[in-house]
Amino acid sequence: MDPHKRSATIEVMACDETVVGGGRFDTDRAGYAAMRKYASQWASRVWAIEGCQGIGRHIANRLLADGEQVVDVPPKLSARARVFATGQGRKTDATDAHSIALVGTRMAGLRPVVNDEQLALLRILVDRRRSLGEDHTRMVSQLHQLLLELIPGGAKKSLSAAQAKALLATVRPRDTVGKARRRVAAELIGDLERVYRRSKEADKELKELVASTGTTLMDLHGIGPSGAARLLVEVSDITRFPDRAHFASWNGTAPIDASSGEQVRHRLSRAGNRQINRVLQRLNGWGLLWMAGV
């Protein structure tokens, strides 16, 4: 299946890679029911869906709830299969569905998608916490710009809402534009206070939920509730990685060989799961400081 928000294109492939069916279905109730009815003619079936941790998650969850077997096809694998099958990289829904079917048929060890309510809840909460953090960063940036225009030299880089409020209280512009700047800055400070409260509540909820899983990730220096939750939801079942080298390649921490001739050197990878990479880099940085006694 090549999934989208409002539609899904499927191709039905037998074990010998013979295409025996396919079609495009809407993802509303009627379209989903029609797709299930169409697929019911093949009693022994497994759904191979691209991006079950992303765009394909919504329809994978519905199929799981209906007792279907689902495996996750990584987009990189289906992209390679498309190039090999067609000789070029042009994308259509039909060619995408065909390449996904090829991967699902040929590849052993694709990760089965399971309906883990605890991980699903963790994902919702950690995504919300990340969104709050992004909102905070954006608002602080806007507030700094306004304060720079209201106060010569602006404010210090590390600025709390309370400090910004105290600074703003010293400013009394008389012109219309200055008054508008001050009003918008005051609104941003109010928004920052609300985001801070929600972030604090989200951290508390995440901490309790992560602790209930029995993991000891938060015992590591540099791993907080958000980092631990992100590791749990993205990694899911660690046994899907044959060894630590595969795990390092997946999260982008494995160095890439860039040797030439007698010169042996490596460079940082920009590939892999960047969210996990960010968490692990933060862990590594704190670990170095801790070992140094900082």
Image (spheres, rainbow, N blue to C red):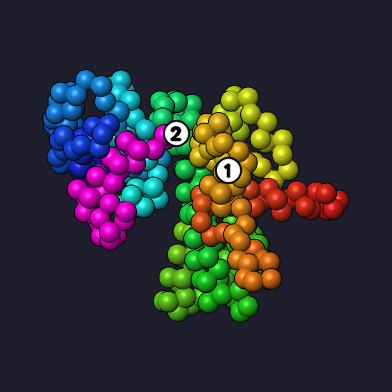
Q: Quadrant of residue 83?
A: bottom left
Residue 200 seen from this side? no
* Relative height, residue 83 to residue 204 (above, below): below
Where in the figure is residue 194, as x and y percent of width and height? Answer: 51, 47
Identified at 28% across, 40% down, the residue is 101
Is residue 170 rendered to the left or right of residue 176? right
* Relative height, residue 265 to residue 202 (above, below): below
Identified at 41% across, 30% down, the residue is 112
* Relative height, residue 289 to residue 211 (above, below): below
Residue 240 seen from this side? yes
Identified at 85% across, 53% down, the residue is 292
Dot 1: few (<14), some (14–19), or many (≥20) neighbours within 10 Å?
Answer: some
Quick one: quadrant of the N terminus? top left
* Element carrying mark 2: loop
Identified at 37% across, 40% down, the residue is 73
- According to the picture, the residue beneath numbered tag 1 turns out to be 247
Q: What kind of residue is marked 1?
A: Phe
What is the residue that sits farthest to the right in this orientation? 293
Dot 2: few (<14), some (14–19), or many (≥20) neighbours within 10 Å?
Answer: few
Disc nearest the viewer among 2 and 1: 2
- According to the picture, the residue beneath numbered tag 2 turns out to be 109
Q: Of residues 223 and 13, which is closer to you in this image?
A: 13
Q: Earlier in the sequence, mark 2 or mark 1?
A: 2
Is residue 35 rendered to the left or right of residue 160? left
Q: Of residues 149 and 142, which is closer to you in this image?
A: 142
Q: What kind of residue is marked 2?
A: Gly
Where in the figure is residue 137, as x and y percent of width and height? Answer: 53, 58
Task: Give the overall secondary structure of the magenta segment.
Answer: helix
Range of the magenta residues? 83-111
Is residue 124 rendered to the left or right of residue 284? left
Where in the figure is residue 27, as x and y percent of width and height? Answer: 20, 37
Q: Quadrant of residue 262?
A: bottom right
